[in-house]
Amino acid sequence: MGRSAAFFDLDKTVIATSSALAFGRPFYRDGLITKRDVVKTAYAQFVFKRAGADEQTMVRTRDYMAALCKGWKVDQVKQIVGETLHDLIDPYIYAEAATLIEEHQAAGRDIILVSASGEEMVQPIGAQLGVNDVIATRMKAEDGRYTGEIEFYAAGPAKVEAVRKMAAERGYDLEDCYAYSDSVSDVPLLAAVGHPSAVNPDKSLRREATDRGWQILEFRHPIPLARRLRNRPAVPVAAAALSLGVGVAIGIAWYGRRRRARSQSATA
């Protein structure tokens, strides 16, 4: 048996929102996009997620993304994502997805996020989940700015090709691998592995999953990272912090009693 991995789509599978749209407000605030861009992108995302996308639609979406990002400073984009990630993404991470990722990791499987969103967004989100490997859209940049060209668009057949290439390089047995997605556009990805699951599937994917006998999962509980950590059993770091706090409290109490005893002795 070869090595195994679990491939997770991102939007509406791991997070209860669109990673691209989530950063629309700070991008607009910092002058990278206009209100018209926000509306147009939101509509395109809605159509894509609702009905999937044929090759022509994906090409138009790719070209629109490239033109939209042309001239943006790479460092500025990374800074915006880094500064707003906690508020815009963390509250929307599905608790069920986070638990499933941890279970796969405990079983020794590699975790890979596979998303059409830019890797500048996907990588930090993965880091929050303890996931280092991503397959995401890569924009071409020169002199610190995006050129308006896309090196790799992680959608449709290209997404599956990237998964197969990674599997060949790392020795994954795809029949022993897992994949999770919510969109009918990812049917080729789900069909490429031995253990596919439709998560919160759109109407078309639900029908496809039912016909093929694929597992259907419903994720309904986005919970912020801080709350998930509070709900977990105590870990060594937490235990150490608790011990330190208790130790300090005991020391303060002991010191207070000792001072009172000395004061009473001196008064006597």
Image (cartoon, rainbow, N blue to C red):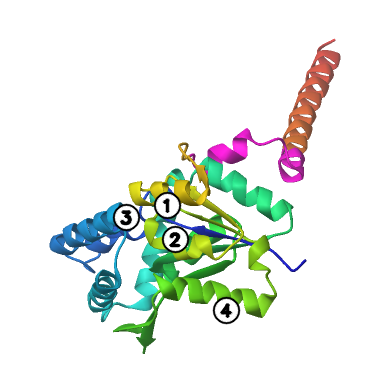
Which label sits in the foreground, 4 or 2?
Answer: 2
Identify residue type, mark 1: Glu
SS class, disc 4: helix
Q: Are marks 2 and 1 in contact (CB under 8 Å)?
A: yes
Q: Are marks 4 and 2 in contact (CB under 8 Å)?
A: no
Residue named by callout 4: 165
Instruction: Please identify the quarter of the rendering in which residue 71 is found.
Output: bottom left
Crowdedness near tag 1: few (<14), some (14–19) or many (≥20) residues, C-alpha within 10 Å: some
Identify residue type, mark 2: Val
Q: Are marks 1 and 4 in contact (CB under 8 Å)?
A: no
What is the magenta range? 223-241
Q: Residue at x 34, y 61 (%)?
A: 20
Identify residue type, mark 3: Lys
Which label sits in the foreground, 2 or 3?
Answer: 2
Q: Are marks 2 and 3 in contact (CB under 8 Å)?
A: no
Residue named by callout 3: 49
Residue named by callout 1: 208
- Distance from the alpha carbon under mark 2 to that under mark 1: 8 Å
Residue named by callout 2: 187
Q: Residue at x 29, y 59 (%)?
A: 48
Determine the residue located farthest toward the left in the rendered image. Answer: 36
Name the foreground residue: 107 vs 133. 107
On screen, residue 155 versus residue 255, left or right, reads left
- Distance from the alpha carbon under mark 3 to that under mark 1: 15 Å
- Distance from the alpha carbon under mark 2 to that under mark 3: 13 Å
SS class, disc 3: helix
Crowdedness near tag 2: few (<14), some (14–19) or many (≥20) residues, C-alpha within 10 Å: many
**Looking at the picture, does residue 79 appear above or below residue 200?**
below
Name the foreground residue: 175 vs 76. 175
